[in-house]
Amino acid sequence: MRSKKTHAKKVQFDPIYGSQLVAKIINGTMLEGKKSVAAKQIYHAIDLIAQQSGKNGLEYLSEAIENVKPTIEVRSRRVGGASYQVPTPIRPERRDSLAIRWILNAAKARSNNPTRTLADKFAAEILEAHENQGAAVKKKLDTHKMAEANKAFAHFRW
């Protein structure tokens, strides 16, 4: 018999925007428990987004993340000694966390110009993601392509 289900921890809303999304991004950015440093970087990035787009930074951010969210992924499933990549739909919470993780990783992987801060890189990645471009959107498209290529094994999903 399986043990009890674990309940997801509630993420606190961030103090400035009152947004759970921004709080999750700050938590994903944080290194070595330095939340205030991460928060400064993300708030600065949202200000940069608002300046460069001429729109509300928070709305622009949520639209960009919506463009990065994947709908389907492949998972390995062992059937009769062989492993198959089985396409499966993604739960909404996982869609959010994948999109945030992909955007942050893409921002960190941007050019190593020492004058560019993480806030600059994050803002640039969000601006590209809003236009359906950039590394994070490419990652989503690659995931969807992989699922499409393995559609023949969808009947192994249970």
Image (cartoon, helix red, strand yellow):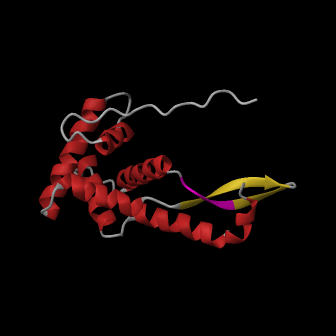
Q: Quadrant of residue 129?
A: bottom left
Which residue is drawn at the image coordinates 24% and 48% (left, top)? Answer: 119
Left or right, 108 with reference to 5? left
Q: What secondary structure characterizes most of the magenta part?
A: strand
Q: Is residue 157 above or below residue 18?
A: below
Q: Is residue 121 above or below residue 147?
A: above
**Quadrant location, the N terminus:** top right
- The front one of 157 and 150 is 157
Asked if residue 23 lies in the magenta stretch, the reply is no
Left or right, 71 with reference to 148? left
Asked if residue 88 lies in the magenta stretch, the reply is yes
Which residue is drawn at the image coordinates 71% and 30% (left, top)? Answer: 2
Residue 153 image position (x, y, % from top left): 73, 66
Residue 126 image position (x, y, % from top left): 29, 58
Q: How many marks?
A: 0
Which residue is drawn at the image coordinates 70% and 54% (left, top)? Answer: 76
Which residue is drawn at the image coordinates 19% and 56% (left, top)? Answer: 49
Point out the stretch of residues depicted in magenta.
Answer: 86-90
Residue 34 image position (x, y, % from top left): 31, 29
**Quadrant location, the C terminus:** bottom right
Does the rendering let one see residue 46? Answer: yes
Outermost residue toward the right in this view: 80
Residue 3 image position (x, y, % from top left): 68, 27
Left or right, 98 with reference to 125? right
Does the rendering let one see residue 135? Answer: no
